[in-house]
Image (cartoon, rainbow, N blue to C red):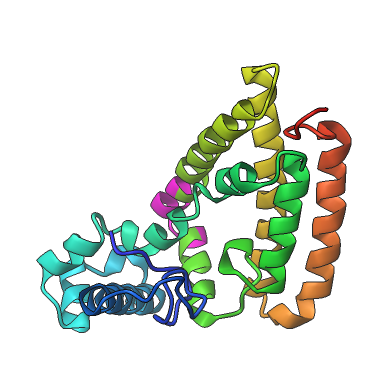
């Protein structure tokens, strides 16, 4: 699947506006098509509701065939959740790429704070209309909510548990699973509060100081229990 990010403008592979290596013309056209389909779908879903819009209608509005839609998004639910699910492995990647001496909680705290400052939609702190439309759709549509909170959480926990276990000299699966649940629970709690503020109409820039303070407090609480777990010991 061609990668796009929630709230993307179509400029970068991650929605940031830049790529490490410029893609070829064919890849750029594929990405632009995926973005057009996604933006069209979100606009129609936001206007009429997820269950009231067919894939055929999305294809017609995006000026592509129904088959083209399914070439980029395997299911109707993927039109909403596909970009978000590209972040499933992100916590695991952050831990994997952290220096050996850096505890897991520190690595994820640092990453989350940087993402907040960048108004990354993955943190919930984004007042882009399309991002808000996606969050509202998930909240209002049971099938999307179930997949977002059950499927996403399970995948992220499994991936993070694997990375934590790889950094644990004791190779204790229970500790790795509990730590993964704590760390992801911390992030999810913060993200849900940020989303709530965005849905009430607050501006992301105004909420940022509170969101940063909440992140520091929440990860400090997690650190009290996890300590230097995930860091190499001398």
Is residue 141 highlighted in magenta? yes
Q: Main secondary structure of the magenta part?
A: helix
Q: Image quadrant for the C terminus? A: top right
Q: Is residue 214 above or below residue 153?
A: below
Left or right of 213? Residue 45 is: left
Depth check, front residue: 75 or 21: 21
Q: Residue at x 15, y 80 (%)?
A: 60
Question: Residue visible at 33% across and 72% down?
Answer: 38
The front one of 189 and 19 is 19
Q: Which span is picked out in magenta?
A: 139-147
Name the residue rendered at 37%, 58% in the picture.
82
Q: Where in the figure is residue 114, as x and y percent of width and height?
A: 71, 65
Residue 156 higher or lower than 209, as above or below:
above
Residue name at image x 70 percent, y 20 percent: 169
Residue 202 visible from this viewpoint? no
Q: Position of residue 183 (x, y in %)?
A: 70, 41
**Residue 174 spot, x, y in % from top left:** 65, 19
Height in image: 35 above or below 124? below
């Amino acid at each position: 699947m061609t990668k796009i990010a929630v709230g993307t403008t179509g400029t970068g592979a991650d929605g940031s506006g830049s790529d490490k290596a410029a893609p070829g013309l064919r890849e750029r056209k594929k990405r632009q098509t995926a973005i057009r389909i996604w933006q069209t779908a979100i606009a129609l879903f936001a206007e009429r509701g997820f269950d009231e819009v067919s894939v055929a209608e999305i294809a017609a509005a995006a000026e592509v065939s129904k088959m083209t839609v399914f070439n980029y998004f395997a299911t109707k639910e993927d039109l909403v959740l596909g970009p978000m699910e590209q972040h499933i492995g992100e916590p695991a990647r952050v831990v994997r790429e952290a220096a050996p001496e850096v505890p897991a909680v520190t690595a994820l705290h640092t990453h989350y704070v940087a993402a907040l400052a960048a108004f990354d939609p993955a943190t919930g702190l984004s007042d882009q209309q399309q991002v808000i439309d996606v969050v509202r759709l998930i909240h209002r549509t049971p099938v999307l909510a179930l997949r977002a909170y059950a499927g996403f959480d399970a995948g992220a926990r499994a991936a993070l548990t694997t990375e934590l276990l790889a950094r644990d000299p004791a190779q204790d699966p229970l500790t790795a699973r509990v730590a993964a649940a704590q760390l992801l629970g911390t992030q999810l709690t913060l993200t849900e509060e940020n989303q709530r503020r965005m849905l009430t109409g607050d501006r992301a820039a105004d909420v940022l100081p509170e969101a940063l303070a909440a992140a520091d407090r929440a990860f400090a609480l997690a650190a009290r229990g996890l300590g230097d777990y995930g860091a190499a010991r001398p």
